[in-house]
Image (cartoon, helix red, strand yellow):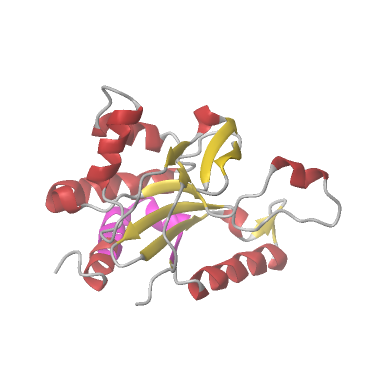
């Protein structure tokens, strides 16, 4: 497993409203600043080491960003960004199944993470299409530069105006290929898999296999 080259510098995640506008406080250091929409997202800008990003590290950061806040309040804030019952089920089952079992070694499960980012002005430019796959449903940063993308697919992933669309589907699989070639692992769930009977067992089975693959659990 080769992982992804480069070091994560800014994580813009947990988006729960309009896309925030960003600028550079220091372009040389790649330090960003939220110009508008700051209340709709979180920005993690601490160094991420060889162990990836752990839930315990995210909670410690949150306690400094929002003094007095704890893991429960962080979890509640992240859940506000979840867009469907299927996403909420995956998120809740992950922590129910592994928070105690893995303790301080639990990888952070980040919802609604921006990957590609173009400015609002792109809408006014001729012959310039918005960047594809701007946001991922979930991202995990594991040790050894392993980045795990988890997507929960509703009908908007393969339809347009409630009609099946080969163009929409082609854009999705093309973006998947680019991510995989860059070293990301991409896993997709159909939304129907994550609701109703058997959903919790299906989610747990996936994470068990993922953690064994990456030697997080034996």
- Please indicate whether residue 79 sits to the left or right of residue 202 in the image: right
Q: Residue at x 49, y 35 (%)?
A: 41
Q: Is residue 148 left or right of residue 93?
A: right
Is residue 79 positioned above or below 105 on the image? above
Which residue is drawn at the image coordinates 41% and 60% (left, top)? 7
Question: Does the magenta segment cover residue 179?
Answer: no
Q: Is residue 179 above or below residue 110?
A: below
Q: Which residues are magenta?
A: 186-206
Residue plotted at (41% across, 43% down): 45
Q: Which of these two is toward me, 45 or 160?
A: 45
Quarter of the image that includes the C terminus = bottom left
Residue closest to the eye, 111 or 122: 122
**Side of 128 where 162 appears, left or right:** left
Q: Quadrant of the N terminus?
A: bottom left
Residue 19 rendering spot, x and y as whole percentages: 60, 38
Instruction: Give the quarter of the image for residue 23.
Output: top right
Residue farthest toward the front in the current orientation of the protein: 28
- Pinpoint residue 214: horizontal percent, then vertical percent: 26, 70
Does 193 appear in magenta?
A: yes
- Tell me residue 145's x, y (percent): 35, 65
Figure quadrant of residue 120 = top right
């Amino acid at each position: 497993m080769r992982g992804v080259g480069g070091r994560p510098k800014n994580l813009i995640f947990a988006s729960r409203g309009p896309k925030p506008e960003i600028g550079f406080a220091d372009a040389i250091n790649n330090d960003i600043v939220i110009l508008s929409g700051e209340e709709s997202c979180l920005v993690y800008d601490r160094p991420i080491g060889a162990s990836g990003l752990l839930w315990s590290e995210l909670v410690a950061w949150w306690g400094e960003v929002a003094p007095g806040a704890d893991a429960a309040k962080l979890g509640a804030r992240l859940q506000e960004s979840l867009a469907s019952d299927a996403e909420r089920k995956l998120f809740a089952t992950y922590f129910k199944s592994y928070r105690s079992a893995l303790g301080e070694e639990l990888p952070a499960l980040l919802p609604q993470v921006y990957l590609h980012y173009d400015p609002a002005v792109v809408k006014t430019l001729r012959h310039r299409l918005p960047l594809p796959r701007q946001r991922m449903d979930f991202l995990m940063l594991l040790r050894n530069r392993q980045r795990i993308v988890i997507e929960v697919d509703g009908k908007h992933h393969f339809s347009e105006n409630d009609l099946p669309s080969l163009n929409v589907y082609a854009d999705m699989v093309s973006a998947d290929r680019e991510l995989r070639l860059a070293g990301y692992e991409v896993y997709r769930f159909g939304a129907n898999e994550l609701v109703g009977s058997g959903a919790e067992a299906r989610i747990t089975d996936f994470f068990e296999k993922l953690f064994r693959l990456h030697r997080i659990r034996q």
